[in-house]
Image (spheres, grey):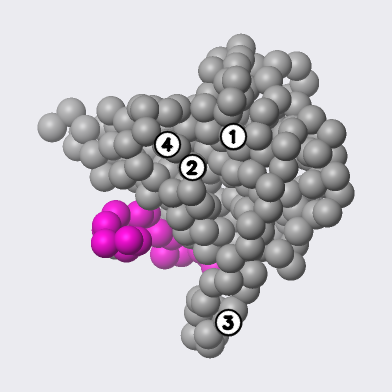
Amino acid sequence: MEHTTELEKILHKIGRNFSVKFEPLAIDGQTFDILAVENMPAYLDKLVAGGSIADPLRDLPLWAKVWPASFVLAKALKTIDTKDKTLLELGAGMGVCSIMASYYDLKKITVSDSSEDALDFARANVLKNNLSSLIDIRSLDLSSPGPDPRFAGTTDIIMASELLYLDNLHRPLLKFISRALAPGGKALLCQDLSRAKPRFKKLAEKSFKVREGRTAVKSVDENKEEERRIYSVLILEK
């Protein structure tokens, strides 16, 4: 009952701006309930009318979409040892990838993002799927200067999807990963290859051992047409 009450509070807060409903999301035989926005066009019109979109890459609610890269990243976790490890997801949005990773015998998962709206959606998803004992929610802005004492060399695995499109985030991201990873830790970064940033890989190779894998994914676009895209997964080892 406690979780139900907390979930109702968060959904009430979310409902001030968004019309939402939970929809099933299946992966590898597991089904999760994920919050979906029903009034996104109206919400975007409101942002435009209010002059709130100065930089589309930063100001649009890109976190509200379930990106294919999240599925690729969740499956990539199977290639490394996750048993009793701690996991931190950066720029997690609604926390979909972390929720999918909840079946990988991890000791603790932390979902982080700089958007309070995204974190509210993540909280709702975690509560709805009864994962609050495993998954924590944290506000984290990677562009903030200086080390974050909450993650000082304590994280076994860091993961992020579709973060590398922001060039000015490359150096802060690498600094954060270097400071936050525990000895022997790994960071997995997934990106649609069409948006890949070769410069980031070169920067990463100065401080980490870097491996890259590529995965082809078939999906359906907004016009209900099938498309095939290639995703890159960079694995940074400390």
Give above or below for 3 relative to 147. below
Badge 4 is on which residue?
A: 82
What amino acid is found at the position of numbered circle 2 in the picture?
A: Ile
Q: Secondary structure at mark 4?
A: loop
Badge 1 is on which residue?
A: 186
The span shown in magenta is 25-42
Q: Quadrant of the C terminus?
A: top right
Residue shown at 65% from the left, 34% from the top = 237
Q: Is residue 195 magenta?
A: no
Give above or below for 83 relative to 182. below
Main SS, magenta region, reads strand
Residue shown at 52% from the left, 58% from the top = 72
- Circles 2, 4 touching at the beta carbon (< 8 Å): yes
Residue shown at 77% from the left, 21% from the top = 145
Numbered marks: total: 4
What amino acid is found at the position of numbered circle 1 in the picture?
A: Lys
Q: Is residue 145 visible?
A: yes
Residue shown at 74% from the left, 67% from the top = 194
Q: CA distance from mark 2 to mark 4?
A: 6 Å
- Circles 1, 2 touching at the beta carbon (< 8 Å): yes
Q: Residue furthest top?
A: 149
First in sequence: mark 3 vs mark 1: 1
Q: Nearer the viewer, residue 103 or 183?
A: 183
Badge 3 is on which residue?
A: 227
